[in-house]
Amino acid sequence: MIAVELQKMLRRPRTWVTILLLNALPTLVAVLLAVTDLGPRPGTGPAFLSAVLADGTLFPLAALAIILPLFLPIAVAVIAGDSVAGEAQSGTLRYLLVRPVGRTRLLVAKLISVVAFVLLAVVIVAATAYVVGSLLLGDQPLAASVSGTTLTPEQVAGRTVLAIGYITLSMLGVAAIALLLSTVTDSPLAAALGALAFLIASSLLLTLDAAEALQPYLPTRYWLSFVDLFRDPIFWRDILRGMGLQAVYVVVLVGAAWANFTTKDVTS
Amino acid sequence: MIRTTALTKRYGAILAVDGVSLDVRAGDIYGFLGANGSGKTTTVRMILGLVLATSGEVQLLGQQMPKGGRTALPQVGALVEGPAAYGHLSGRANLALLDAMGQGGVRRTRTRRIDDVLEQVGLAEVGRRPVKAYSLGMRQRLGLGAALLRQPRLLVLDEPTNGLDPQGIREIRELLLHLHARGTTVFLSSHLLAEVEQLCTRVGVLDRGRLVLQEDLANLQAPTGRTVVHTPDHDRARALLDGRIEHRDGDRLVIRGADAAELNALLVADGVRVTELGPERRTLEQVVLAATDTATGQVGA
C-alpha cells in the first residue's frame, strides 16, 4: 500500500512541477548574486547568503533557508491537503476503501508519502543549489561556522545531511495539520489553505511580544534552528526542542485525523 | 449474498434509509429500484461499509459489515455513483494501481487479468490512452472493468449504464448476463425500469428510504387473471361478452377470465375479428407505481 502511494506521488506531474518551482527561487537568487556581486551584509538576509559569494559550496544551506519559511510549507500544505480530500473529490477514495484498503493503513501511507515528498524536494533543492553554487558563485573554501571557527568540508557535508533531516522533520507539523483537514473536508483547496492559515498565525504570533508565553509551542518556532547545526560545537538545545515539538504535533494531529477518518461516512 | 436487517441511516433530522431489510440470494440479478433521492446510494454505501449505519445490520457474503470488510470486500466488485480514475494515468495504469492496493490482487496474473477485463468492457484499444481523454461512456466502462478485475462473486453496481449509448447499454447488459451465467450474483441499483425489467430476476423497490416491495420479477409479472383483446368489432364483442368486459379503451378490451384460448374460440365462432389477444400482465412500471403510491398513502395517514 505504501509502495503504491509512493508510486502515485512520483507519477504525478504536479509533484515534479512543485519541485521545479521550489528550485526556481534559489536559482534566481544565485544568478542575481553572481551577476551583480552584491551579497547581503553579514547578519542580514536569509541565513548563509552573505557567505556564498565567497564559497559557493555553502549555497545549498542558503537555498534551504530561502525556501523554508514559505515556499516549502506551501508545497507541503498543498500535497498533504490533497492527500485524502483529493481522492474524495475525484471519487477514487470510495474505490480505494472498497478494494478494500483499511482506513488506518491509507492514512499512514498518505503520511509517509508526504514525508517522502518533503525529503525528495529538500534533497533535490540542496543538490541543485550545490551545482548552481559551485558553478556560479565563489570557490574559496571558506567553510566558516556560524561561530567563526573553520569547518572541514567533511563536517559541512555531514551537517548539511543533518540539516536536510531536520528540515524534513520540521515540515511534519504542517503535513499533519493539512492531513487532518484533508480528512475533514472533501476540498483539497480548503485543506491546504486551512493549513497555511495555521502557519501564518504561528508566524505572526512569533513576532508578537505579548504572545511570548505561547511561542515555545508554535509549530514554526524552531524551524530556522537548523542554523544551529553549523555552530561549533553544534548547539543542540533548540534542535531537540524543535524535533520534540514536531513529534507532539504529529501525534496529536494525526491521532485526530485517524479518529475522524475511521469513523467518517464516506459520501464523496 | 447481501442481507440487511432493519438498516437505518439518519442524517440529522432526515431519515435517509428507514428499516430496510434486503435479501439478495446467490444467483440473483437483483434490481434495486427507487427514484432519485430515495436512499438507494446510501443503502449501497452502507452495504459496502463506506457509510456507517445508524442502526440495523449488514451481512455481506456472510460477514458482518463494516467489520468483516477485509474478508468480504475482496470478493465483491463495485461501481458506486459513477466511475472514478486518475486522469493523468492511462486506463491500464489505473487498473494496475487499483489492483496493487489492498489484498487479493495477485501480481503474477495482473497483466493478464487487466487485458481480459479491458477486452470484456470493450476498451482493449484505448487502454493506453490517459483517462482524461476518455468519454463519459469509456470511463463508465473502465469503472466496470475495475469492478471485474478480481473475478468477484458479487457485483454491486450503482447505475452502471449511465452515460452509455444504446449500443453500449446492450453490450453491458450482455456482459452482465454472461457473468451471471458463469455464477456471478449481480446487485444492480437503478432508476431505469426498462433496464431492470430486461435484466433482473428479482426486484426491490425503495421509496423515501423504505423498502416497499421485494419480490421475484416472474411473480410480479404473473398473469392477472384477465385477458386483453384487440378487436375492431368491439360492439359485437360487447354484446357477446356482456358483463365480462371490465374496461374498454378504443379497440382494446380487458376481459375477466384467464383462459385466452377459450375466449378466442368464443369470439371467432361468433365472427368477431380479433387482431390481438393474450393474458394481461402488469408491467414493472405499473407494479412499482402501485407500490410507491400505497406507501405514499401510508406516509400520509
Image (cartoon, coloured by chain):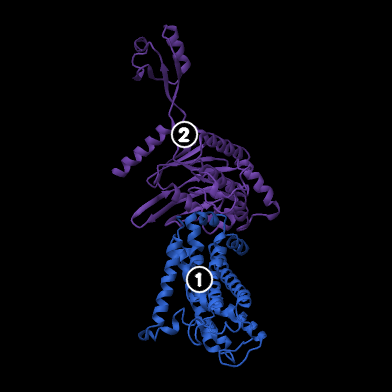
Chain colours: A blue, B purple
Please give the residue where the numbered disc 2 appears in the rendered image. B194
Q: Which mark is residue A249?
A: none
> How far across and how far down the image is residue A78, in percent?
49, 66
In the image, residue A112 lies at what x, y percent?
Answer: 57, 69
Q: Kindly identify the amino acid type of the residue bearing the numbered disc 1.
A: Ala
Q: Nearer the viewer, residue B71 or B121?
A: B121
On screen, residue B105 above or below A252: above
Label 2: chain? B
Q: Chain of mark 1?
A: A
Foreground of the two, A208 or A87: A208
> Badge 1: how crowded within 10 Å, few (<14), some, or many (20+)?
many
Q: In front of the other: label 1 or label 2?
A: 1
In the rendered view, tell whether residue A24 sits above or below residue B114.
below
Can you give x and y, in whole percent of width and height, for residue A106 in the image?
Answer: 55, 63
Mark 1 touches mark 2? (CB < 8 Å)? no
Which residue is painted at 58% across and 79% down in the image? A59
Residue holding disc 1: A175
